[in-house]
Image (cartoon, grey):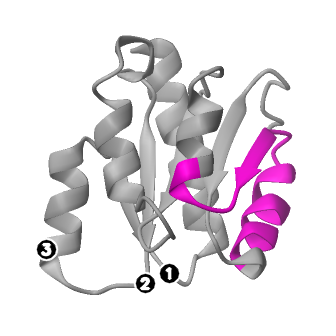
Amino acid sequence: MEPAPASRTILVADDQAGQLAVIDMLLSLDGYELATVEDGREALDWLKTHTPDLAILDVAMPFVDGIDVCRRMKKVSRLQAVPVIVLTGLRDDATLEGARAAGAAAVIRKPLEGKDFRATVRRLLDAATTG
């Protein structure tokens, strides 16, 4: 894969430091700028003053879960077009359906598959740029 434009900013919200480190390692390979936060409340605070090119939100976070952050993002006009990837370790259909109903562009189950994860990020960013 060719390097991503440096101007691509991705918001990553996950309360597990290990998961944030894995995502940082995977996406830094492609040259993305990451803004990382540790819970849904921090994500919402960050989104008040920033518009990312993509958001990656864990489902199970303190204060506000990733599905609720996605739902709230889709109610703000400047954030409606931002693609959202929801990450989950859960295997139930309700989580998948809830994420899609909230407006998530993709749901990725943990543990992450590096190559597939990076390809999904690239695909969503490319679609947002051309679409």
State how far apart marks 3 and 1 are (Cα).
Answer: 16 Å
In the rendered image, the vertical position of residue 104 relative to residue 5, given as above or below? below
Residue that label 3 marks: 94
| Contact, mark 2 vs mark 1 (Cβ under 8 Å) | yes
In the rendered image, the vertical position of residue 34 relative to residue 37, given as above or below? above
Residue 64 visible, this angle: yes
Give the magenta-colored segment's residue range.
Answer: 19-41
Question: Residue 71's spot in the image, x, y percent?
Answer: 28, 42
Residue that label 1 marks: 110
Residue that label 2 marks: 89
- Closest to the observer: 19 or 115? 19
Mark 1 element type: loop
Relative to residue 109, is residue 30 drawn left or right?
A: right
Question: Residue 53's spot in the image, x, y percent?
Answer: 59, 27
Q: Label 3 crowding class (10 Å Cα cut-off): few <14, some 14-19, many 20+?
A: few
| Lower position in the chain sequence, tag 3 or tag 2 | 2
Which image quadrant: the N terminus?
Answer: top right
Q: Does the magenta-highlighted stretch encompass residue 30?
A: yes
Q: Does the magenta-highlighted stretch encompass residue 82?
A: no
Mark 3 element type: helix
What amino acid is at disc 3?
Ala
